[in-house]
Each structure stands twice: as structure tokens, then as C-alpha cells.
Image (cartoon, helix red, strand yellow):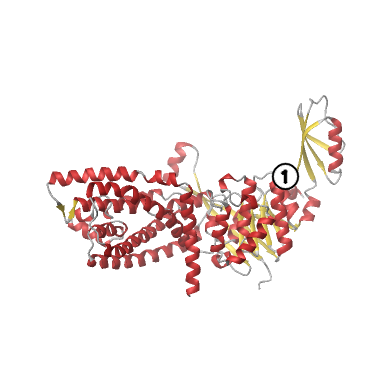
Amino acid sequence: MPDLAVAVEGLAKTFVVRHKAPGLKGSLRAIVRPSRRDVEAVREVSFAIQPGEVVGLIGPNGAGKSTTIKMLTGILHPTRGDATVLGLVPWEDRRRLAYHIGSVFGQKPQLWYHLPPEDTFRLFARIYELDQDAYRRRRAELVELFEIEPLLDVPVRKLSLGQRMRCEVVASLLHRPRVLFLDEPTIGLDVVAKEKIRQAIQDMNAEEGTTIFLTSHDAGDIEKVCRRVIIINHGRIIFDDRTAVLKRQYLTRKIVDVRFHEALTGPLEIPGVHVIKQGTFGAKLEFDSQEREVQSVIQDVMAFASCQDINISDPPMEEIIRDIYQA
Amino acid sequence: MWIQLRVGVAKYGAIAGINLQNQLAYVWDTISRSTHIVVFMFIFTQLWGAVYRLQDVTEINGLTLANTIWYFLMAEVLQIGQIRHDTQITEEIKSGAIAYTLGKPYNYLGYHFSNGMGETIVKMGLLWLLGSPIALAFAGWPDVRLAHLPAIAVVYLLAIVVNFCIISLIGLMAFLIEDTFSLRLIYQKIVFILGGLLIPLDFLPEGLQRVAGLLPFQLTTYAPARLFVGFEWPMFWRQLQMGAIWLAILLGLLSLQYRWAARRLAINGG
């Protein structure tokens, strides 16, 4: 049995991208003299993941997260470098490895769109060569964990995005993968649906010791699910440490969007809180949660005027990465 | 070995089965997509009826008008109902869904064959159901003996497999180029003439008939359609031999192409 769940050494992927100048002239020139450019999606990244670890790979769009996952699942061949997943080279032993890993690509469906999820589950039981008893037991466990019993006989096209995503994750877990790759599993989901997926992933890791490798550009996924985080930008790893370290150092800033019932009559002034933008009925505020507690900031905002809606969020991933670069 | 075979049949059978269910989920849509065979068959019967009438013959190169009409039904059903996974592969790459289809423990082309068969069975069945009343009305019962049907079924299956291999060669080009539609168009036009879809190869000049007889395209359409309307054992064995040779060549090419293309796959959106 391999010591490491995932071992990556100097992994790189370069895509050749065709370029065309804008307009008709550009189109004609591209026919006569096509121009191509190499784009380094992943630049010699190295990391190792222990069995049972929950690791988040985060970064802005185009950072190389999905490409990394696709190389580790054997879909893409790297341009350079080595990697093993459960001791197998993914792009050489793709089929053998597929029995032991699972993957969820948040933006892509694997469930049959016009059929109920149950039909896809049965298909996957055959594809992964599960015996019928083992399949029924596993299905029952996952149906309970992800709370999808009422959804099993509903055609996928009738499900909400959050419901569909829970079923997508279940489909990827039927064969008890030892390593689960989740590529943006919460993208586009509302707060409740995100929370359900995150909780189920945590429970599964705790109960079954499944190694989880998760990509996201939502810092919330990482804070709630991962114990370790790798940040990738422009194909390079710029941070690889415990999530607690990231939170302590970079995820302390919070953004508050507030809408008031009545028009504001004067400038919003709260100690320790920076006003990014103020309108007639709303404002965007920023504060450091190490300097001021979230609860007290909200109390101050509510004391200032009657609130219609308040939303607290983390700064966008791009800003966190900028902070890391500045540090 | 038997266990492996059983597992394989269950796996690929389940893939075919789910697409079959998918087709049946919208059975009226599937039926409406097949109704054009009625128009095709009506036009063909009128066209070839006029040809035979104007020439004042009962047979052209061994084929009666009734033979020709049933030949066309068979040829059209085979071509319209064929597995067309090249567009699906192109879509998978464009949408990135290939991350799922390529990442499962099965043979990627085996998956597409089984998946395609699930659809083809429904499509071909419907095309037969809708097209045969027209053929019956204008040509009467086909001149086919029950004892020959199993042999014809073998050549029919061979046609589906050979066509699948050629379409796969086109589809896998999507790993390298943006769109394979132009290649499919070229293939379709070749099948029109050298496959015997537009006119039976028997009606072509002798030289062209000989060339067409050596190519794989006639296996996809002409061979099963011609055997259906005039079965001869020597022709059956000859087609089987040709099929074996071309399958070996096509599968060899596919294997090389797949290995080469998989290394160069680039998926949109990372």
C-alpha cells in the first residue's frame, strides 16, 4: 500500500493556444499566418497528500486548479513532471486508478439529464463492478448522509442545482473511492446547499477516512472543510500550509453588505470599520475580524439604522492572493 | 475469463440500457425525429418507379424495382440510424464533460459503442416500423428467406461496427481539432457513392464497382442491404472476409490514434 495518497513532483502542463487579431482582417491573417502561443496552465507544482487528509487547492479562475485535477485523474497528460495517486501514474493507469478514485466537476453533469438519479446510480454500480448487496448498502448510507431520498425518482432536469450537486457527489462515492477529487463542488450554490455539501464531505472524511482534494475559488469551502490549503496562481503554488495559518494571516478581513429600510442622512461611521462604498439606502463595509468581533460590528450597524438585509462575506480570492503576494 | 466476460457484458450492457431508457423517456420526440423516413421512402419509390418505367425494364443489373425499394429502406435505416458519436465526442471536449466520460473504468470507445447501441436500437427499430409500410405498399413483401435472416443480421451488425470504427476515427480527431463536422460531411458523401446509399453499387460502372467493393464503405450500407434483397452464400462469405480485414485495419488505426490523441487532449476551461 502506498504511503502517500497523492505525490506530485514538478508537474507542468502547457497548452498551445491559437491567437487571432480582432476583426475580419485578423481572421484573414490567421488563415494565412496562424499564430500560436504556449500557455503554461500549471508550472512545475510539487506537493504530497497523506491518506485521510482534506486538502484544498484554491486560486482565481484560470489559476490551473482544474488542469491539476484533470492530470491527477488521468484525463490530461502532463507536459513535464511526475505524479502518483495511490501509487499509480494517473495518465498511464487511468482505468485501474478509476476504481479507487472519485471525481466531481461542479460545472459538468454526469447524471443522465432526463432520467432520475437512481438510474445513473445503478449504471455506476455496474461500471464500477459493485455486487448488488454492496451497492444497496452503500446507496442507503449515502442517501441518508446527503439527504436525497425524495430526489431519487425525480428526473434530474427537475432538480435544483443544489439537489443535483448532492446527487452528483453521491454518484461519485458509490464505489467507496479512497481519494475524492472535487473540482468546484459548490459553484453556483446557495448558502444552504453549500453548507449541506460541505457537511457531508466532512462527515465522509471523518467516518471513512477518504482523502479529499478539493478545488474552489470560494474561501468558505476551504475554511469549513479543509485542514490544509494550497493556493495556486498563474500555475504556481504560492501558499501551502494549514488552513488555520491561512485564516490567521489572510482570512481575517470581512466584507459587510448592508441595506437599510430608510435613506441614510449622514456618513456611516463605526470604529474599526472601513466604509468602502456608501449609497442612499446601503453601504459596503470592511473590517478585520481580529480587531473587531463580527457580532459587535453587526450590532453597531443595526444601531446606526434599521436594516433590511445584511450579508457578510470573505474578500474575493483575487484579493487574498494579492495580500499573500504583498506579504 | 468467464467472470470477466460476464462483468464486461453487464457493464457495457448497462451503458446501452441507460441510453435506451433515455430514448424511451421522450418516445414521441424520438418518433418524430424518425418520421422523415416516410418522406424519403415515398420519394425513392416514385423516383425509381419512374426510372424502371421509362427504361421499360423489370430488372436493372439483377435488381427488380421491388428489390431496389427494399434495398433503399435497408440502406437508409442503416445510415440514418447509425451510431453518431463523433458529435458527442466533440461536445464532450467543448463542454469539458469528457472529464467524466474518460475518467471511468471502461474502454472509452467501448463506452461510446454501447451508449450508441442503446440509441441505435430504438432509432433503427422506429425507422423500420415507419418505413416498411411504404415499401410494402409499393413493392410488396421482400424476397427474403427466413433461413437467411441470421446471416443477414451478422452482416448488419458488421455494418454497424465498421461504421462505428470510421466515425470513431473522425470523432477522435476532436482531441486535436475544434470541430470534426467537415470530416463527417466528407465521409457521408463517400458513403453516398462508394457505400451504395444513393444508388446500389450494381448500378455503377464496372470499374467503380470493383474499387468500391474493396473499400470499407460498402460494408456499412451496400453489403447488408444487397444481401437482404438477394441473398447469396458466396457474397455473404466474401463480405465477412472483407469485414474481418477492414475491422483489423480500422481497429489497429483506432488504437494508434487513441494513444496519440489522448496525449494531446486539451479540454476547454481547464
Q: Position of residue A56 (x, y in %)?
A: 70, 56
Residue highlighted by disc 1 = A319
Q: Position of residue A317 (x, y in %)?
A: 70, 46
Image check: B219 left or right of B24?
A: left
Tell me the amino acid under the disc marked 1. Glu
Q: Quadrant of residue A15?
A: bottom right
Q: Residue lying farthest left? A: B56
Q: Position of residue A26 (x, y in %)?
A: 47, 40
Q: Which residue is painted at 40% across and 43% down in the image?
A: B32
Q: Position of residue B91 (x, y in %)?
A: 48, 50
Specify whether residue A184 is in view: no
Q: Nearer the viewer, residue B33 or A191?
A: B33
Subunit ID for the residue under disc 1: A
Using a 10 Å C-alpha cutoff, classify the residue at mark 1 as few (fewer than 14 neighbours), some (14 to 19) or many (20 or more): few
Name the element at disc 1: helix
Q: Is residue A311 above or below residue B158?
A: above
Specify whether residue B236 is in view: yes
Q: Residue lying farthest bottom? A: B1
Q: Is residue A269 above or below residue A163?
A: above
Q: Nearer the viewer, residue A29 or B97?
A: B97
- Counting every numbered tag in the picture gives 1
Image check: A9 left or right of B114?
A: right
Q: Quadrant of residue A89?
A: bottom right
Q: Nearer the viewer, residue B267 or A125?
A: A125
Q: Nearer the viewer, residue A118 or A52?
A: A118
Q: Which residue is painted at 20% across and 56% down in the image?
A: B202
Q: Quadrant of residue B236?
A: bottom left
